[in-house]
Image (cartoon, rainbow, N blue to C red):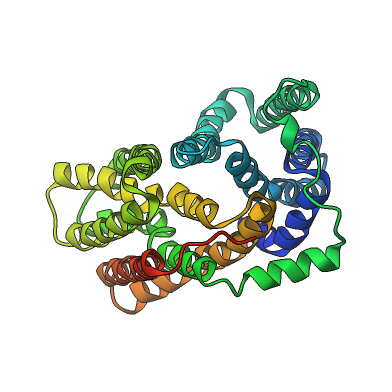
Amino acid sequence: MGAAQGTLLLVLSVPIGLIISKIGGMKLLFISLFLYSFCAFGISIAASFAALVFFFYFAAAAFAPFHISGNSITARVAPKGKTGSIMGTFSVAGDLGRIALPTAALFIITFLGWRYTFLTLAFLGIFACGFLLFMLRDKKSIFQNINTSDTTEDAKDWLIKMIKILHEKPLLLILLAGTLDGFGGSAIFVYLPFLLLAKGIQASFLAFYMASYFLGSLSGKKLLSKGTETYGAPSVFIIAEICMAVLMILMTFVHQYLLLLFLSFILGLFTRGTTPIVATLFITISHESHYARVYTIAEIFFGVAATISPILLGKTADAFNINVSFYIAACFAIAASAPIILFTKSEKRTIQ
């Protein structure tokens, strides 16, 4: 059940991109949020385990459009020169909802019980739906220009164009860099506790280290994306990947607890801070009519990396030790910088 969300996202990526082109990203976002809220309500009143499983998978399917829709919308409304910073803010907001709120929900469950907690989630979702509906109906809203579809072409033509842009060298280089970055950094959150336990840190103190990593993640997404406005997304990405690799190797040698706490923060800054940078790189090469296609393709590639990476690093840790897993992740991080170096030397043109 835990893998359902990622699996459904991969399966539904292409249909989601196609739907966005037909009805617009904001409308799909509204529909998804409403269905997600409905599923939360369904879970709160489920009378059997079968009903719980049904609503869980339905909720996973309803959540699937959020990344592609959100990235496409953010890319279109972000003013030029501020794209990186706004992408970073959007990514931070996503992390707060994806990590901070579920953590808070665990505490709320102890007081209200899981049924009332999900019922509360459903009401919050409906409130958010009302806000989105207001934004869609308000003629002065900045979202009005993305309320409608991007194209009148049929599904076959849309898919043909998506396959065609896959032959574009700049896009392939960014996809390769993002995929390697995913192999290097996406599973570190999972295996950092095992590295810390191997160094003798008690399980009861792991929360402090993971909180430090999470705060680093939020800071990195904002700070690094802000840096793209001054130094450019390619330069910031390359530096971040090199720093990420150095930190991964360094953490295998450090044993001082306070230093490890600090390094956890810095590691989170670089491993998760690259996410909005990659999203910004796609904007630099794409016409806005291709945003849904580009982010659909990216979701497929990066989803595969996020699925395989934990398995690869886990198998490596079993065969050797957790340190070797971090060395391999560092190699992926270094490798991720190579495509962007080539990207900076390639011809700059927008995919039309």
Q: At x 37% / y 38%, what residue is drawn?
A: 226
Does 143 sit above or below residue 188? above
x and y, in percent, of residue 153 in the image = 85, 59
**Residue 205 visible in the picture:** yes
Extreme residue in the bottom direction: 319
Where 255 falls versus 80 (above or below)?
below
Is residue 3 in view from this perspective? Answer: no
The location of residue 16, given as percent across then percent down, is 75, 54
Q: Residue at x 57, y 71 (%)?
A: 168
Q: Nearer the viewer, residue 167 or 61?
A: 167
Q: Is residue 313 left or right of residue 204?
A: right
Name the residue rendered at 51%, 38% in the picture: 80
- Vertical arrangement, residue 106 with respect to residue 259, above or below: above
Quadrant holding the N terminus: bottom right
Name the residue: 62% across, 53% down.
287
- Give the x, y percent position of residue 348: 47, 62
Q: Nearer the viewer, residue 23 or 347?
A: 347
User: Quarter-wise, where is residue 8 in the image?
Assistant: bottom right
